[in-house]
Image (cartoon, rainbow, N blue to C red):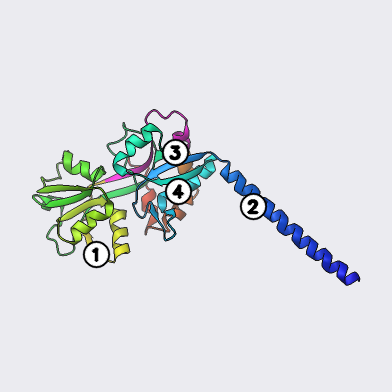
């Protein structure tokens, strides 16, 4: 009889432990769902933001944003947007911020910025058999870019004396299309963030050659509306810097990119 009581006591203790653990999980879930939501707008731009096999947003920016906003007391909702309408969406309040490998260069007066939190090279890539080896070789050639991106502005404005006059500049709405155009020979070259080019080659088992001479080295930031005075932008900048200093950003970036430390060398970018 005594043995049965011991067994019953053990079972009761286990039931109480499971029940208490369940209550704790429910409390944690409730706490998360009660946090205010930040809506972050981005497009499909691996390795910074893309949908995994389960259709869930993932990538460098998704992980950085999730951790940063969690520290700030928010939960984040990452939504896919029409990248060409990003400024309109953030100014209307439909989204709270833009974070998708977004270059700050030339846009400092257009938004309120948190960053830079990553340094990125804008580069030109060509097919391996191409006779293009430097930027000056692009004269008279056809080049594809994603519309409303920094490379589009660089080749349209031609403020940099290194940029020659192209034969045609083709702006396409989706990042993947520029590489398809290059692979099929519709264009002679493409221009984009180096990380995007490298990721595409990994994903589609193809090979392009990246020119050694970069278009520019730019800072990547989080963009809020110019008149956003909630203080979230400033808090985000401080939190991202804390994550850079405590090693969190490095741990996230190294999941996706080789030589992750070079992407965190943002102090000399001049912003």
Q: Cα distance, mark 2 to mark 3?
A: 31 Å
- Say if residue 62 shows up in the picture: yes
* 251 left or right, relative to 177: right
* Mark closest to the chain's N terminus, 1 or 4: 4
Closer to the eye: label 1 or 3: 1
- How far apart, in angstroms, are the residues tagged by discs 1 and 3? 36 Å
**Which label was assigned to residue 250?**
none
Q: How far apart are marks 1 and 2 (CA)?
A: 47 Å
Q: Which comes sooner in the sequence, label 2 or label 3? A: 2
Q: Mark 1 points at which residue?
A: 207
52 or 254, which is in the foreground? 52
SS at badge 1: loop
Q: Is residue 156 left or right of residue 149?
A: left
Q: In this view, does 24 lie to the left or right of 37?
A: right
Instruction: Using the numbered discs, state the Cα–Cα distance from disc 4 to disc 2 in whole angstroms.
Output: 24 Å
Magenta stretch holds residue 235: yes
Give the CA distance from mark 1 to mark 4. Answer: 29 Å
Quadrant location of residue 31? top right
Q: In which quarter of the image is the C terminus?
A: top left
Q: How many labels does the image show?
A: 4
The magenta region covers: 217-236
Residue at position x 19%, y 51% in the image? 144
Check disc 4 and report its element: helix, strand or loop: helix
Tag nearer the camera, 2 or 3: 2
- Disc 4 or disc 2, which is closer to the eye? 2
Marks 3 and 4: which is nearer the front? Answer: 4
Bin the neighbour count of mark 3 within 10 Å (Cα to Cα): few under 14, some 14-19, many 20 and up.
some
Relative depth, front residue between 11 and 68: 11
Q: Mark 2 points at which residue?
A: 25
For image coordinates 78% across by 61% down, the residue present is 13
Q: Tag 2: Cα neighbours inside 10 Å, few (<14), some, or many (≥20)?
A: few
181 falls in the magenta region: no
């Amino acid at each position: 009889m005594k043995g049965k009581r011991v067994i019953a006591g053990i079972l009761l203790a286990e039931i109480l432990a499971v029940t208490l653990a369940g209550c704790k999980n429910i409390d944690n879930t409730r706490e998360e769902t009660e946090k205010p939501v930040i809506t972050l707008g981005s497009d499909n731009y691996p390795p910074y933001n893309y949908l995994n096999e389960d259709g869930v947003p993932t990538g460098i920016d998704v992980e950085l944003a999730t951790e940063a906003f969690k520290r700030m007391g928010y939960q984040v909702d990452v939504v896919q947007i029409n990248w060409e309408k990003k400024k309109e969406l953030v100014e209307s309040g439909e989204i709270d911020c833009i974070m998708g490998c977004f270059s700050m260069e030339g846009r400092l007066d257009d938004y309120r910025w948190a960053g830079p939190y990553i340094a990125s090279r804008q580069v030109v890539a060509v097919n391996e058999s191409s006779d293009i080896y430097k930027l000056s070789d692009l004269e008279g050639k056809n080049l594809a870019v994603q519309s409303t991106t920094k490379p589009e502005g660089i080749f349209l404005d031609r403020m940099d004396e290194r940029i020659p006059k192209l034969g045609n500049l083709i702006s396409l709405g989706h990042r993947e299309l520029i590489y398809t155009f290059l692979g099929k020979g519709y264009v002679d070259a493409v221009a984009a963030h180096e990380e995007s080019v490298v990721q595409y080659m990994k994903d589609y088992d193809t090979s392009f050659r990246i020119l050694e001479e970069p278009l520019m080295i730019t800072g990547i930031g989080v963009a809020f509306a110019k008149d956003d005075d909630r203080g979230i932008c400033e808090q985000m900048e401080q939190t991202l810097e804390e994550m850079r200093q405590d090693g969190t950003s490095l741990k996230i970036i190294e999941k996706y990119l080789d030589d992750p430390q070079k992407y965190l060398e943002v102090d000399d970018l001049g912003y």
